[in-house]
Image: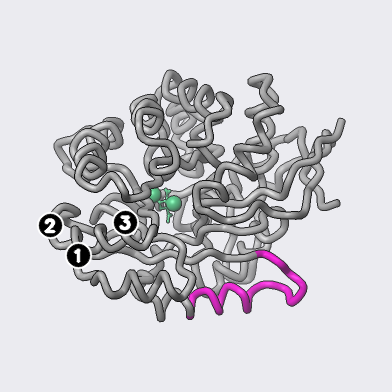
Amino acid sequence: MELQVTKPDDWHLHLRDGDLLEAVVLHSAKHFGRAIVMPNLKPPVTTTVAAMAYRDSILKALPPDSIFKPLMTLYLTDNTRPSEIKLARNSGVVAVKFYPAGATTNSQDGVTDIFGKCFPVLEQMAEQNMPLLVHGEVTDSSVDIFDREKVFIETILEPLIKKLPQLKVVMEHITTMDAVRFVESCREGYVAATVTPQHLLLNRNALFQGGFRPHNYCLPVLKREVHRQAIISAVISGSKRFFLGTDSAPHYRTRKECSCGCAGIFNASVAISLYTKVFEEAGALDKLEAFMSFNGPEFYGLPRNSTKIVLKKSPWRVPESYAFASGEIVPMFTGEMLEWLPCDI
Ligand SMILES: NC(=O)N[C@@H](CC(=O)O)C(=O)O
Ligand SMILES: [Zn+2]
Ligand SMILES: [Zn+2]
C-alpha cells in the first residue's frame, strides 16, 4: 500500500547548535520542507541579528543541494522591545516564542510577567501579524505538574486573548482535553495548536513501563489516556486549528540517563511514520495530509509545499540510537518496528 502526500512541514522543532545541530538537522531536512526552529539555545536567540546568524549556521550544516527551509523565531524576554519585532518581521523572522521563565529546557531567560513589560511587544506583534508561539504551562510549584497546562489556559491564555483578540497564537505541543476545548472555542485563524507524536501515541504510563523511562520524558509531561484520546479526536476531526509540530528535542543519551535528566524526546527520524500510524489506527488516513501539510502553512499565511512524498507500507526497525562523534541520541520508539516508511518521489 502507498500513499502520496504533499511534503509536510514541522511547525515546532529544536535543531540546537554546534555538534548537536550537525548531528540532527539531516533527519528533519530529509522529509520536511520547512520547519519552525525554536530559539531556546544557550544563550537564547533574542534578537533578529542572532536569528539570522542561527539561520546561517543551520543552512551551513545542510548539504548544498538541500531545499529544507528553516523558519526562524525570536525568544521573548521581559526586555524585548517593540522595535525588535518590526526589525524581525522585515528580516523574515516568522514568529516569537513565549517561554514562561523556568517552564522548560533553557527557559530561564523567559518571561516573568506577560501582562506587564511585554504587553507593548504583544501589541506590536498583533499589528505586524506576527504569531506568538506559547509553551503553555504555569511554573508555580504549588500547581501539580499534570495541571500546569490547564491552569495556564485559565490564568494566562484566556485573559491574553480577551485583551488582544487580534494577536495570532499557537499553543505548542498540546497535551490535554482542556487545551483541545480551548483551541476549538477560539476564533479560527487566530488560535491554533501543534501536536506531537508522543502526545498522540503515549500516555503517562509510558514514563513508568517496567521501570523509569527517561526517553519518554518531555515537557509538557505525558498525560492520562483520556487526554490522549481527546487529542486524537481533535487531529482526526479535520479541523484546521491543529497541525504537525514534532517538538523533536534532542539531548545526548548521557543527559537523559542521569540523576537529573533533560526533558525532550528526539523524534525527527520517526515522526512522519508515527503520525501516519495514529491516523491509520483511527481510520482517518484521509485527514492526514491536511494535518501534516495544509493546516500549518494556511495558519502562517505561507504557500503549501509543491513537491510530494510517498508513504509506503514497508516495515522498518527504528535504530536503537544514532551515534555521532559528539555523543549518542536515542530516538522515540527506539528499536521498535514501524509500518510506514516515508520516501521521496
Ligand atoms: N519539549 C521538551 O521537553 N523540551 C524542549 C523544550 C520545549 O519544547 O518545551 C527542549 O528544548 O528540550
Ligand atoms: Zn515547550
Ligand atoms: Zn519544544
Residue marked by disc 2: 116
Q: Is the CB of mark 3 within 8 Å of ligand 2?
A: no
Q: Which badge, 3 or 1, comes first in the chain's sequence?
A: 1
Q: Residue at x 42, y 60 (%)?
A: 95
Q: Quick check: 24 left or right of 42? A: right
- Indicate which label's residue lies in the foreground, 3 or 1: 3
Placement of 137 over or under 328, stated as above or below: above
Residue marked by disc 3: 126
Residue marked by disc 1: 78
Q: What is the distance, in whole Å, between disc 1 and disc 2 at their CAs?
A: 8 Å
Magenta stretch bounds: 53-68
In the rendered image, residue 344, in percent from the top left (x then y), is placed at: 82, 52
Q: Is the CB of mark 2 within 8 Å of ligand 2?
A: no
Say if mark 3 contacts mark 1, CB within 8 Å. no
Q: Secondary structure at mark 3?
A: helix
Q: In this orientation, which residue lies closer to the viewer: 34 or 163?
A: 163
Q: In this orientation, which residue lies closer to the viewer: 160 or 42?
A: 160
- Indicate which label's residue lies in the foreground, 3 or 2: 3
What's the amino acid at mark 1? Asp
What's the amino acid at mark 2? Gly
Placement of 9 over or under 143, stated as above or below: below
The question of residue 61 being in magenta is answered with: yes
Q: What is the distance, in whole Å, between disc 3 and disc 2 at their CAs?
A: 16 Å
In the rendered image, residue 155, in percent from the top left (x then y), is placed at: 18, 38
Placement of 215 over or under 59, stated as above or below: above
